Amino acid sequence: MTKREIQADKTKKRIQEEARKLILEKGIDKFTMKDIAKAADVAVGTVYLYYSSKADIQVAFEDEAYLDNFREIMNDSSLTYGQKLYKYNKFWYINGEEMGAAFLRGWYRFSLDKENYANESDGHLESRIEREIKVSEEMLQYGIDSGELDKETPTKELAEILTVSRQGTSMYWALMDGNVSRKHILNEYLYHVLEPALKRYGLKSAIEP
């Protein structure tokens, strides 16, 4: 890499880190691109070189927080399919708990405000829900490809149901200000929603730690 490329990489990483701090400290709906620039000690235009909007920042944060973890778990050959499902969903719920109820309320306000989100992203970015549905489809397709689920499993329809169910329980927890055990909600989702739904399509591995 040239000196200019090395410097650009350092600048991007600094912006990423400061944006991550602001997301965790304030929530995605409580800061501006100018705030990121100030925190990273760069011009606002420099921030826009790497992120076109806050929605773009949200996607990058989600990829780091969830998608990378999902792929790592799905590619772990030491785990059964049921263990993969347990491990990813446990991570999903516990990570949300660590972010906090106030954080998630802000996150949902931003993500579910379709008009604002579309304006932020020029209409090119998918919402968090849409992205999670695709992850759930990938999870189900993995089950089909590995022989854990029936070939006729309706991946798209089932992914939508599972994703909305999981997000609903998470939103409920946030609206209750975290006064309900998220671990309890995890178990309710796993064994009263996910496992029964997948058993209808031939699930072979029990969902377990």
Image (tube, rainbow, N blue to C red):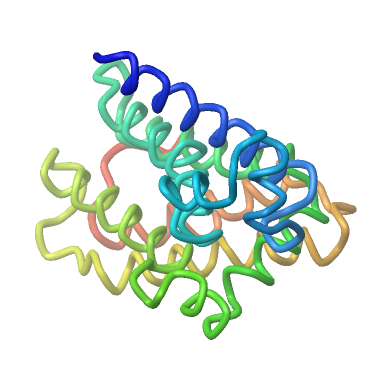
Q: Quadrant of residue 68?
A: top left
**Residue, x 70% and y 63% (percent of image)?**
29
Is residue 170 toward the left or the right of residue 160 in the image? Answer: right
In this picture, is 121 found above or below 150?
below
Q: Residue at x 11, y 44 (%)?
A: 145
Residue under the image location 22 percent in, 45 percent down: 143
Could you tell me which quadrant the N terminus lies in?
Answer: top left
Q: Position of residue 73 (x, y in %)?
A: 36, 28
- Residue 188: horizontal and vertical position, in percent? 63, 53
Residue 198 vertical placement versus 95 (above, below): below
What x and y, as percent, mark residue 125?
A: 37, 67
Q: Dividing the picture into quarters, in which one does residue 107 lie?
A: bottom right
Drawn side of residue 142 relative to residue 21, left or right: left
Q: Nearer the viewer, residue 157 or 112?
A: 112
Closer to us: 33 or 206: 33
38 w.r.t. 115: above or below? above
Number of labels in the image equals 0
The image shows residue 132 at horizontal and vertical percentages of 41, 58
* Lateral position of residue 74 relative to residue 105, left or right: left
Task: Give the camera-side residue of 132 and 19.
Answer: 19
Q: Is residue 65 above or below residue 31?
A: above
Image side of residue 34 versus residue 44, left or right = right
- In percent of the image, x 25 and y 51: which residue is there? 138
Kindly indicate the quadrant of the structure image that contains residue 148: top left
Q: Nearer the viewer, residue 137 or 198?
A: 137
